[in-house]
Image (spheres, grey):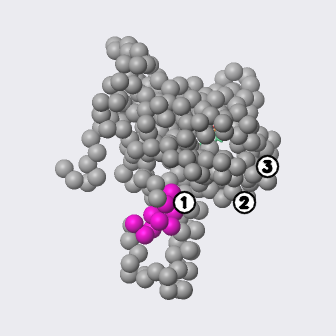
Amino acid sequence: MIESIKRLVGTDKSQPRTREELIAKIRQSPLPEHVAIITDGNGRWAKKRGLPRTAGHAQGMKRVREIIRAADELGIKVLTFYSFSTENWKRPKDEVEYLMKLPSEFLKTDLQELIERNVKVQMLGEKSATPSYTQSALMEFEERTKHNTGLILNFAINYGSRDEILRAVRQMIEDVQNGHIDKDRIDEELMSSYLLTRGLPDPDLVIRTSGEIRVSNFLLWQLAYSELLFTDVLWPDFTQEHFFLAVEDYQRRSRRFGAV
Ligand code: IPE
Ligand code: IPE
Ligand code: MG
């Protein structure tokens, strides 16, 4: 893990490769099906430059666009961004308001490209707690891309894994009580089907930027066997090359799932 952090921040200059060489090499090995990213460090990026935190979020949104393009180019099946947690409501009102306006900005600038790329946009998280302009932008993304068959792009907004698990448990209890499911048939597969990620593969690779080494209430059930990659790079500095190197790092790992 330490080695991969060094490589991602670019201290290993032994093997300079062009973008094309890197992509060609990645294509030779199996890809992660689902990559999930905790896009952290926007505030610190802005602070380092004497800018308001919102400037970091604006730059971060540009990186989201670039990484969607990179994932699509590689042929990744599912890409998930952790964009706003259930705990992020604790932030100053101005910052929350700015973040809640980003989906409608992104809709104006990027919906067309996502449609052209055949990307299907989905949300993880309780939309109804967000302002009406956020909800309508999120719903328009989902509605306008729902028949697309390419990259599945999830935005976790107002998402919290413990909240997701509690909702699943409550719903399951209700379904046992009303006879829809049998208590003795509750297994991992059934539990997964009650989560917001139902139908999606668990993340193979989870990337967290900004040097924090924690998961912050993200996909706690789903990342039981995910490969985790932590890098000091702040999200607004995270380029397509960093993304390709992260995928390459994943491809060098040996996943055992408890076996030998
Ligand atoms: C991630 O960047 C974006 C959100 C959580 C919305 P931060 O805003 O958490 O940036 P830092 O961690 O303060 O640098
Ligand atoms: C995690 O980042 C959530 C998102 C990236 C949306 P935070 O910045 O909220 O996490 P903590 O508070 O450092 O754990
Ligand atoms: Mg943060």
Q: Mark 1 highlights which residue?
A: 196
**Residue 249 in view here:** yes
Residue beneath the point at 47% across and 31% down:
73
Quadrant of the rendered structure where residue 126 is? bottom right
Residue 69 rendering spot, x and y as whole percentages: 53, 31
Query: What is the number of callouts on the image?
Result: 3
Q: Secondary structure at mark 3?
A: helix
Residue at position x 70%, y 33% from top? 109
* Mark-to-mark CA distance, 3 and 2: 11 Å
The residue indicated by pointer 3 is: 133
239 is higher (above) or lower (below) than 230:
above
Q: Mark 3 belongs to which amino acid?
A: Tyr
Label 2 residue SS: helix
* 242 on left or right of 65: left
Residue bearing the label numbered 2: 128
Q: Which mark is residue 91?
A: none
Q: Is residue 256 left or right of residue 146?
A: left
First to last magenta residue range: 189-198
Write the residue at 61% across / 40% down.
Answer: 115
Q: Amino acid at mark 1?
A: Leu
Mark found first going from the N terminus, 3 or 2: 2
